[in-house]
């Protein structure tokens, strides 16, 4: 490895005035001269060379200061996949370090759960670090001294109250009417005005359009969701897997089963793109079936249970399956669905249609806006 020089190529720093000509030692060339450069047989004035050498020295000195600062002031504390950077007075360096240390789709922390023992429904959100949906800008609670416990604690937000900055206050963006209607609501981490001001806000739009219109955040990313039915049904997050406190049930009475072809049935999970859900399917017949055994499949044919000939009780099974959730209203009106099929074992004959199919949502994996990044 090369030895670090002990001297910088300092040149014409004083920019003295020549006593004879009265001209400075440095004079910036014209734009035309910069474009053409020195020509053959030309004798450029000394001021041009002094300007060039001095500018090179200034840039080299600036780069040296950045490298010195990096080695002398940056501490990498790797906790929960986060890197905390002691930035001192160099905000530019901190920004550069964030973009280099974290991938554009980075997400860690920001777990959410129902706040216990409170009469007013609240959601607790742990500190974390996540990338803005469109860029490598980091939403990092460790950079926000006003976040509880100096960035490492938990922020609480009340569901049925208008948003306010800080802990133990309202969380719903002003673009959503109160009291809340039954439906899905989404949790967003945002940076407000300055990059160090991190907060949590709720919206009824999965893309956070009301948050963006109301607050104009400098960075935003969806970090979770909850279901409101007059009370709070929160999906608790562990990584990017969301599990229900109480399974959400969707009943389908007299479903239109045709032969062994799968049908799409609505499930109780948020209408998000690309999520993978975990479901329990219960199919019920009003009377014992006759003929061959019946097989129940989910998510494109994965067999999850069977009903023996002569029985009419429920069939219970469990499987991961893709939600067929098309957000384009001309296809599916943004209703999340999964494929469920019922067929006769070893027979092409049409099955006996069940009187009811119930689908329980146990949890789902949400890419948390990874699709926004388009890393390829």
Image: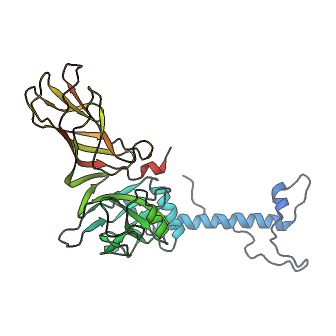
Q: Measured from the top left, where is residue 322 in percent x and y? A: 32, 40
- Tell which residue pokes out farthest to the top in this image: 347
Q: Residue at x 36, y 50 (%)?
A: 271
Residue 275 in the image: above or below residue 261? below
Residue placed most toward the observer, 213 or 68: 213
Q: Measured from the top left, where is residue 28 in percent x and y? A: 80, 68
Q: Measured from the top left, where is residue 51 in percent x and y? A: 78, 67
Residue 102 in the image: above or below residue 298? below
Residue 210 in the image: above or below residue 259? below
Q: In which quarter of the view is residue 85 placed?
A: bottom left
Q: Is 296 situated left or right of 308 in this image?
A: right
Residue placed most toward the observer, 42 or 325: 325
Q: Is 111 situated left or right of 199 in this image?
A: left
Residue 372 in the image: above or below residue 174? above
Residue placed most toward the observer, 180 or 96: 180
Q: Is 175 situated left or right of 322 in this image?
A: right
Q: Measured from the top left, where is residue 169 in percent x and y? A: 32, 75
């Amino acid at each position: 490895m090369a030895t670090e020089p002990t001297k910088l190529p300092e040149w014409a720093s004083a920019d003295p005035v020549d006593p004879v000509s009265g001209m400075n030692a440095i004079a910036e060339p014209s734009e035309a001269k910069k474009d053409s450069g020195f020509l053959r047989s030309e004798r450029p004035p000394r001021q041009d060379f002094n300007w060039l050498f001095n500018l090179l020295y200034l840039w080299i000195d600036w780069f040296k200061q950045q490298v010195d600062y990096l080695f002398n002031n940056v501490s990498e504390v790797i906790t929960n996949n986060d890197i905390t950077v002691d930035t001192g007075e160099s905000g530019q360096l901190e920004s550069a370090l964030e973009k280099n240390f974290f991938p554009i789709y980075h997400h860690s922390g920001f777990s959410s759960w129902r706040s216990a023992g409170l009469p007013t429904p609240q959601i607790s959100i742990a500190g974390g670090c996540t990338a803005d949906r469109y860029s490598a800008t980091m939403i990092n609670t460790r950079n926000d001294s006003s976040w509880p416990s100096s960035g490492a604690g938990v922020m609480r937000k009340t569901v049925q109250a208008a948003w306010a900055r800080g802990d133990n206050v309202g969380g719903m963006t002003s673009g959503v009417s109160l009291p809340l209607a039954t439906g899905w609501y989404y949790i967003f981490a945002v940076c407000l005005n300055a990059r160090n001001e991190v907060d949590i806000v709720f919206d009824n739009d999965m893309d956070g359009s009301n948050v963006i219109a109301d607050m104009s955040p400098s960075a935003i990313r969806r970090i979770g969701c909850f279901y409101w039915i007059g009370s709070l049904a929160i999906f608790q997050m562990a990584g990017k897997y969301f599990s229900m406190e109480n399974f959400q049930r969707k009943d389908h009475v007299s479903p239109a089963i045709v032969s062994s072809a799968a049908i799409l049935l609505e499930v109780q999970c948020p209408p998000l793109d690309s999520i993978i859900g975990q479901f329990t399917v219960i199919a019920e017949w009003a009377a014992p079936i006759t003929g061959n055994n019946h097989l129940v499949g989910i998510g494109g044919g994965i067999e999850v249970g069977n009903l023996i000939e002569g029985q009419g009780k429920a069939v219970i099974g469990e499987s991961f399956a893709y939600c067929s959730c098309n957000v384009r209203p001309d296809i599916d009106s943004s209703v999340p669905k999964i494929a469920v099929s019922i067929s006769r074992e070893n027979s092409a004959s049409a099955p006996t249609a069940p009187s009811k199919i119930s689908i329980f949502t146990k949890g789902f994996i949400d890419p948390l806006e990874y699709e926004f990044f388009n890393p390829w």
